[in-house]
């Protein structure tokens, strides 16, 4: 099965008519481009002959990397070796008609390849040019390769995630990469909006360092006169968190007095709710060693799913589920977040659809990530190769 690069099926999206060249690899840049594709943009993924490194990541799928397929939906795929004159010329023809180019080369590499911002701006002054780096384009670390968990560790996220007195802990799931991808999509969209007024493209810089620090804005405050090490933990104590039940685990949030009172009432601990020792989030955090054992003893009466039903809308909570549970979750289904895709080598698979809803311009139907070089010849023909 093969797909020719044609017009997208379905309604227009807010970015329909926008052409994006995705030269990036891994997650941050590619998924940022998928978010643009969700909104109707035509995205062409340009890979080197060896392919995006994410294709080589471990996967229980024999034909493809699960990560690559999940990150690169709704793109046409082509292979170009930019060190070869003929392929470089093809890219230049694509650049002339493109609105956006995204890459994650280290600073200096694009210029050596002849695809730096100033070089391409001479060909297409309206081009919005987005570079995704590890640490930014300046400073002593600008040439250093950046990776999600490296930046987590560097910026203090892991030390805050770990238990008090314990070792730092990684947040698995590439949270920095995915947040950076949202910054890519948002930054590109803003630059396209500004271009409508000025008629000119510009360079948009996104870095994993900037993304990791942005995610910690609530912690990243140091008031004059404060010591170096102050309380920056945003967690509100032992009550709000994950607790064991008769079967399974449940997350509870009881930061407001209203939710705290409801939690106590539902678990048969009304006398605790009336105790002035526990009548604020700070007090409950201070006395967590007294409160948590009582709460967990009460929670042992029912399973996590039963408690979820008992608490209903009165106590913010969720029974701990697996990722697999999300495919058929009623709320996920109601929001049409999962669709069935047809892939040349995987056949049918179910996957995520789009991250943002637009009521008037919902955007065209998503489609499967390309196999390596799937649309190379068709795209070369389109640009006159």
Image (tube, rainbow, N blue to C red):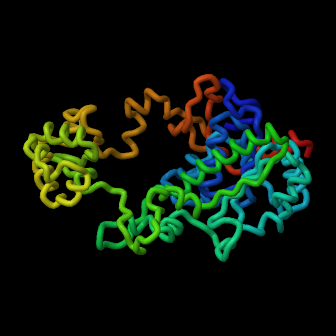
Residue 106, given in percent of the width and then of the height, sits at 71, 67
- In the figure, is residue 343 to the left or right of 317? right
Q: What is the quadrant of the N terminus in the image?
A: top right
Residue depicted at 49% across the width and 57% down the height: 217
Residue depicted at 84% across the width and 52% down the height: 91
- In the figure, is residue 159 to the left or right of 339? left
Q: Which residue extends farthest front?
A: 225
Comparing 320 with 270, the one in front is 270
Residue 185, given in percent of the width and then of the height, sits at 64, 45
- Rendered view: 279 above or below 133: above
Residue depicted at 64% across the width and 29% down the height: 363
Instruction: Please say whether residue 322 is visible from this viewpoint.
Output: yes
Residue depicted at 58% across the width and 24% down the height: 359
Residue 65, given in percent of the width and then of the height, sits at 56, 53
Comparing 151 with 321, the one in front is 151
Instruction: Please say whether residue 65 is visible from this viewpoint.
Output: no
Comparing 285 with 25, the one in front is 285
């Amino acid at each position: 099965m093969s797909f020719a690069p044609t017009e997208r099926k379905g309604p227009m999206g807010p970015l329909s008519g926008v052409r994006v060249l995705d030269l990036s690899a891994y997650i941050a840049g590619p998924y940022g481009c998928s978010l643009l594709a969700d909104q109707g943009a035509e995205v062409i993924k340009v890979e080197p002959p060896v392919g995006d490194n994410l294709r080589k990541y471990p996967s229980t799928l024999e034909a493809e990397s699960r990560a690559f397929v999940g990150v690169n939906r709704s793109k046409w795929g082509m292979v170009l070796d930019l060190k070869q004159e003929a392929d470089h010329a093809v890219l230049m023809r694509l650049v002339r008609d493109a609105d956006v180019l995204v890459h994650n080369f280290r600073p200096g590499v694009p210029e050596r390849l002849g695809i730096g911002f100033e070089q391409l701006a001479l060909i297409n002054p309206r081009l919005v040019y987005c570079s995704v780096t590890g640490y930014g384009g300046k400073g002593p670390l600008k040439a250093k390769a950046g990776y999600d968990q490296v930046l987590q560790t560097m910026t203090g996220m892991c030390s805050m995630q770990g238990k008090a007195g314990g070792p730092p802990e990684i947040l698995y799931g590439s949270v920095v990469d995915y947040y950076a991808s949202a910054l890519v999509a948002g930054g590109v969209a803003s630059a396209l909006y500004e271009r409508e007024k000025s008629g000119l493209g510009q360079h948009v810089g996104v870095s994993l360092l900037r993304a990791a620090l942005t995610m910690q804005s609530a912690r990243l405050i140091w008031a004059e006169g404060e010591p170096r090490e102050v309380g920056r933990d945003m967690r509100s104590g032992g009550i709000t968190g994950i607790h064991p039940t008769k079967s399974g685990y449940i997350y509870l949030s009881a930061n407001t007095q209203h939710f705290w009172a409801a939690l106590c009432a539902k678990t048969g601990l009304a006398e605790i709710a009336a105790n002035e020792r526990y009548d604020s989030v700070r007090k409950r955090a201070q006395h967590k060693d007294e409160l948590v054992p009582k709460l967990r003893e009460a929670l042992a009466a029912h399973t996590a799913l039963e408690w979820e039903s008992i608490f209903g809308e009165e106590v913010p909570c969720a029974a701990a589920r697996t990722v697999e549970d999300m495919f058929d979750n009623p709320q996920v289904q109601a929001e049409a977040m999962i669709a069935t895709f047809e892939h040349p080598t995987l056949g049918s698979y179910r996957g995520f659809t789009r991250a943002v809803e637009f009521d008037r311009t919902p955007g065209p139907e998503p489609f499967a990530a390309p196999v390596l070089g799937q649309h190379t010849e068709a795209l070369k023909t389109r640009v006159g190769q």
